[in-house]
Image (cartoon, grey):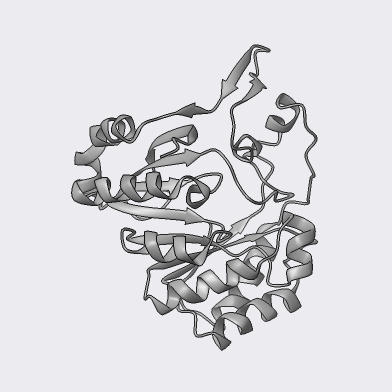
Amino acid sequence: MHVPYVFNIQHFSTHDGPGVRTTIFFKGCPLRCAWCHNPESQRFTPETMTNRDGRETIVGKQYTIDELMEDVMKDIIVYEQSGGGVTLSGGEALAMDAAYIRELAQRLTENEISVGIDTCGVVSTERIKAIAQHADFFLYDLKLIDDDAHRKYTGGSNRLVLNNLITLNDLHARIFLRLIMVPGVNTNRHTIQRTMEWLQNHHITPEQINLLPYHRLGMDKYSRLGRRPVLFNIPDDTLMQDIKTQVESYYDTVTIGG
């Protein structure tokens, strides 16, 4: 079993699923989204990043499952009182060693801790099916419905993304569908319409749709990693509300943010 690297463990998170949660951010992702605000999550191995005070630090640390369990169990009362739990995120949690992630999810479930999976969907369908047995819900990212545009802006095809979304839906998984809204990329009415029509045509029934406005928080991390960010315009409130209204003509449970 290969022990993956973690670049952050965030306690008392309220944006990664129901209740108050601990979110474990694994290091490594199969995509390179142009708008990624956690560039330190992309590579699977540790790397050097300069702190804001100019000092260098190593990003990425290995944790055994026992070590992670010891950490997250400290907040078990918080999970119980808030209806929260633990969310496995990244990078891409499901791109880590499959046996490691499966055992971690099993251990959490055995301790009656809710397990959430934050995924971009670019993983094998077998992995999706296997982890679905131990996950209470999925935070599922759907970035672009057009495959050519998906390749252009993320560096990879959306074929697995769409197929795995259908698979999870067929398994009656709880799906919180996350649509990041990037002006000039996917916020025009035609793209939104195509996305909604695809979801409807495939009978996708998410528990909730979260419209996530693009932001530039974390863009300074690129220079601190020796890279250059790609910057997009930030959507204003009017645009986000217009998108929400359009999506609500297809689905009832739509929120901005989350």
Residue plotted at (38% across, 75% down): 171
* One can see residue 112 in this view: no
Residue plotted at (32% across, 29% down): 67
Residue farthest bottom in this picture? 201
Question: How many badges with numbers are in the image?
Answer: 0
Tell me residue 148's x, y (percent): 79, 68
Tell me residue 234's x, y (percent): 73, 51
In this rendering, the answer to whether 117 lies above or below 68 is below
Tell me residue 215's x, y (percent): 67, 47
165 vs 232, left or right, is left
251 vs 161, left or right, is left
**Residue 145, quarter of picture:** bottom right
In this rendering, the answer to whether 213 lies above or below 176 is above
In the image shown, does 88 or 222 lie closer to the viewer? Answer: 88
250 vs 103, left or right, is right
Tell me residue 65's x, y (percent): 33, 36
Quadrant occupied by the N terminus: top left
In the image shown, does 240 or 258 lie closer to the viewer? Answer: 258
Residue plotted at (72% across, 55% down): 154
In this rendering, the answer to whether 44 lies above or below 49 is below
* One can see residue 160 in this view: yes
